[in-house]
Image (tube, coloured by chain):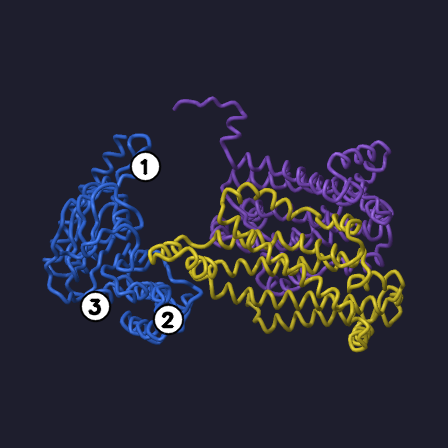
Amino acid sequence: MAVRTSRTIRLGQLGLLAGFVVVLQYLATSGLVGNITLAAPTAMVSTMVDLLASGAIVNDVVRTTSAVLAAFLLAVVVGVPIGWLLWRYGTLQRVLDPYLIAYYAMPVFAFYPLLIALFGLNELPIVLIAFAMSVVAIVINTANGFGQVREVFADVGRSLNLTRWQSFRHVFLPAATPYIFTGLKLGFIYALIGVIASEFILANAGLGFQVSYDYRNFATDRMYAVMLLVVIFAVVANVVLRRIEDRLYRRSVSR
Amino acid sequence: MATLEIDGVTKVYNPDGPDGGVEAVSDVSFDVEKGQFLSIVGPTGCGKSTLLKMVAGLIRPTTGTIRLDGVAVTEPADEVGIVFQEDSTFPWRTTLRNVEFGLEMRGVDRAERRERSREIIDLVGLSGFEDAYPNELSGGMRQRVAIGRTLAMNPEIMLMDEPFGALDEQTRLILGEELLRICRETEQTTFFITHSITEAVHLSDRVLVMSARPGRIKRIVDVDLERPRKADVVTTDRFNRIVDQIWDDLREEAEKGLEASHRR
Amino acid sequence: MATSTSSPVHRLVDDPVTLGRLLVPVAIVVGWELLTLLLGADLLPGPVQTLGAIQAGVKSGWVVPNLVNTLLTIAMGFAIAAVAGFVVGVALGSSETGYQFFEPFVLNTYAIPKIVLFPIFLFIFKLGMDQKVAFGAFHGFFPMVIITMTAVRELPDIYLDVGRSLGLSRLQTARHIVLPYIIVHLVVALRFAFSLTFLGVILAELFAAKSGIGLYLRNAMSVFNTQRIMAIVTILMVVAFLGNLAFYAVQLYLEDRWNLSAEKVV
């Protein structure tokens, strides 16, 4: 059984996507599926382009993007040091471990209504929820990253009598970087998910809000257009982050 | 004054524990003169690594003294370089950046350390690979990088803890030859731990044979084969006689060790 | 060796880790109470009040039926996600071509904020339980596939070689070699599938539901009934925690018994 070349696979994948789009186009334009329910891909794209070009969606794009960045950066600034602390103080890590794992599994999002009641309908609850969803992945992966640093690297550091700081900056940190980045990647994705979900459920602006607003007002073309925009944004972000991640791992993990 | 003077060194782990702890090394004394290549062979658990760590300043002897150029060793020093058995090259640094690492940490300025590193890279036979990352190099080449990193610091003594242990037979032999060449060119004082008697005799001026735990020096063998040591020296009678003698010593120790564990 | 005066309390205090672990929930409750004192009980009901609100809710009858409704929805969604995810995960994990082909689709869809696709579910399934089950399952499907797929791929070829050399059929190989090896990973996958299905159902109920505890949360949110909000959030957190704990306990047991380990962060 021959292994397909990656080129064939790429073509096949594009074919699948294209086929999917063609089917949707057919379903929409032939009238098989009502146009309240499904917009034609062509309409989706043209509406999306219109929205972007006319600037109608700019405010929401800015809202969403700034919320994601704020939540993510906050999660990095808080999460990486905590992850480092957990690695540095192993007992602390062991104590908190089961809770971190549990936290990862709990619908932190359920606190959103409470935050709205506390802070009102604005960006703050959204950023806080997205932060809460993002930070754990960063903490756990940072702690793991430092934890997996090979003993022999520490030995090299000790044999060269490096200062604590030198050891951290030139040995542990570079060794842990790929793993820390994995945490950052996940953190960003979860921040995005948190923001969009919050905006969708209850908000007054943002891309998530636009989708739910358009849904409730039967503005199908517009709804799908914004959906498409969010999907593209998420996929592009994911692909870019994974590329960087792959490069970090490829160089840094040698055997 | 010898470069390395070991006098009455004992190491007891866990001296306050039950049964008074584990005596890893017991009353070891020997010297290493400048430019000498000394190997240690011994059964597993005989304390070779412990001894190396004490010379490196990573752990302290329970009793006895270790002096490097007359100065007592209390902590890791620039004068002592270590090459580990495991691959210790930093995968995120190129060969050049790996080799210059020690110098960089000491604050040597870039131009100077680059120049020195390139010399060393040439010395260890990795010219052309300055910009390669460890994951592009074979295991043997990575050990050359590790050796280069150590040599770049120009240590008084280079400690090597089974540096070729993780490599295949062919690479071992090649690197052994290379190591001889390097040490001859630099007159590097070397302290070498190995499991392989042939490797020890092939490379060294003297071989320390250690007993089973607690590790004592059973015998010091002067390998008076002429230098430079050609590859075919391993076929000579003299060589094999030395190897056989050490082999007998070690077998005796291994049997003693076996008996002891049976009695327990 | 002499035994110390080891009453259970002494033994507990001797081990700082266990002690620490027991202190964490205490710290959480204490922290919560402090926050309440800081912000005022109107804005943030404290632990005691919340407990009272839960009790009142149970008594007045809206907590239990709605919770059960939600849990049933989650259970159904979870079952679908688990089975579908397992089948697809094994299929993709066993076939190199399949993996290469579908992996980008799976991994990229996982990164999409799936809530934004929720209207599609409403279109297809209409309002009611089905859309919640489907949406929940949609959430839980992905970690199930990803973790299962990775586990099957990691199975050392040598084990399969042993099976082949002994002439095992595909089914025997699956049952006696593949399954025991991946079972720890499967439990991890199920744990993630459960958590994400849970989240998916809650999201669905928050947005468009006719029943379920999420609906009540939505209503409480609209009228700023903080007591009720806290009551429901607390219930959800406890249930999620217990569910997760159950899976985790099984995972630890299996890891311990067979000396395997599953490091997976998705």
Depicted C115 relative to depicted C237: above or below = below
Q: Colour of chain B?
A: blue
Asked if badges 2 and 1 are on one and the same chain, I answer yes
Local packing at callout 2 (Cα closer than 10 Å; few below 14, some 14-19, many 20+) is many
Which residue lies at the image location 67% right of the left edge and 38% below the top edge?
C29
Looking at numbered disc 2 in the image, what kind of residue is underneath it? Leu
According to the picture, the residue beneath numbered tag 3 turns out to be B186
- Identify residue type, mark 1: Asn
Q: Which mark is residue B14?
A: 1
Check disc 3: other Cα within 10 Å, few if <14, some if 14-19, many if 20+: few
Q: Colour of chain C?
A: purple
Mark 3–mark 2 distance (CA, rounded to whole Å): 20 Å
Which chain gets the yellow colouring?
A: A
Residue B96, labelled with which disc? 2
Q: Position of residue A65 (x, y in %)?
A: 71, 66
User: Is B116 situated left or right of B137 in this image?
Assistant: left
